[in-house]
Amino acid sequence: MQNKPEISVLLSVHNGQSYIQESIDSIQSQTYTNWELIIIDDGSTDKTSEILAQIKDPRIKVVFQKNMGLTKSLNKAAQIAKGDLLARQDADDISHKDRFRFQKKLFTNNPNLILVSSYTSWINSYGETLDIREAPKSRLEAINKITNLTSPYIHGSLMFKKSSFEAVNGYNEKLTTSQDFDLLIRLSVLGKEFSVFPDVLYNFRIHNDTITSKKWIKQIKNTMKCANLINYYYPNSVQFKTRLVFILKKMIIAYLSMINPEIIYKIRKK
């Protein structure tokens, strides 16, 4: 391993025993090897801690802590990170083996880029493909999504410059959900470029814990805070109708996800 990794991967996990090993394996299988993986075990009470304690790879740093929540945990991981690029990875998702190589190449080819995503494959608990979603190819396309209260990218698919992340003061620790949406809003205001690799580099898993009955109310409240932030930076861009449609849609998704979590991918449109 080189002294200074170019890419630092931020992963926070709480009770992720079902998929955490597969997620870590996908990072260890990367064809681009100059990375470090920072795992925050956020107070897991299942077998997650046991799995993480077995890791021998020197590129992987594991921090065990009392439960602080995803937002604070990601900021903590970012503070530890040594790389100039920060990549997200969720504990139940899978990165394609060439993800880092392709995303890093986009940054190398365009110094004005601060954020890169990719197309995403939505998979079920068995790893079967449910759908493939494209992503905005530019910052302006991403802003159009944002003003419709639609997160333009899957959080785990993101890679962004640490300097830009620090310029907007990282994740907003007042938000326990929608922290990725809030971050994207603030990054968009920097006026730098966003890009996407036009193929699937990330598998986003839909399962029983993807959306819970305990989270959807917080998601609505925090997204409304994000709507206010959007209107602060982009005046009058989020209308009342947009807010109402979002709330109704979120309520429907929360209800149906209790019956069949895979219904989410059918409702959440691009």
Image: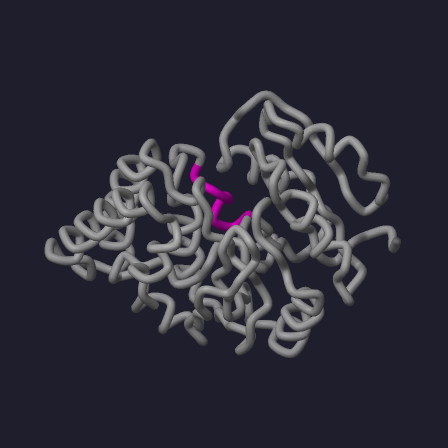
The residue at the far left in this view is 241
Q: Is residue 243 left or right of residue 27?
A: left
Residue 19 position in % (x across, y down): 61, 44
Residue 192 position in % (x across, y down): 48, 67
Q: Residue 231 or 238: which is nearer the viewer?
A: 238
Residue 214 figure quarter: top left
Q: Is residue 47 left or right of residue 15?
A: right
How many callouts does the rendering have?
0
Residue 138 figure quarter: bottom left
User: What residue appears at the point 23 percent right and 54 percent down from the top-left corner?
Assistant: 231
In this rendering, the answer to whether 179 lies above or below 26 is: above
Q: Which residues are magenta?
A: 166-172
User: What residue appears at the point 32 percent right and 44 percent down from the top-left corner?
Assistant: 259
Residue 33 position in % (x across, y down): 80, 61
Tell whether position 52 is magenta. no
What's the coloring here? one colour
Tell whether position 168 is magenta. yes
Does the magenta stretch mainly form a helix, a strand or a loop?
Answer: loop
Q: Residue 139 or 258: which is nearer the viewer?
A: 258
Residue 16 position in % (x across, y down): 59, 37
In this rendering, the answer to whether 62 lies above or below 113 is: above
User: What residue appears at the point 14 percent right and 51 percent down from the top-left corner?
Assistant: 244
Q: Is residue 75 left or right of residue 257?
A: right
Image quadrant containing the C terminus? bottom left
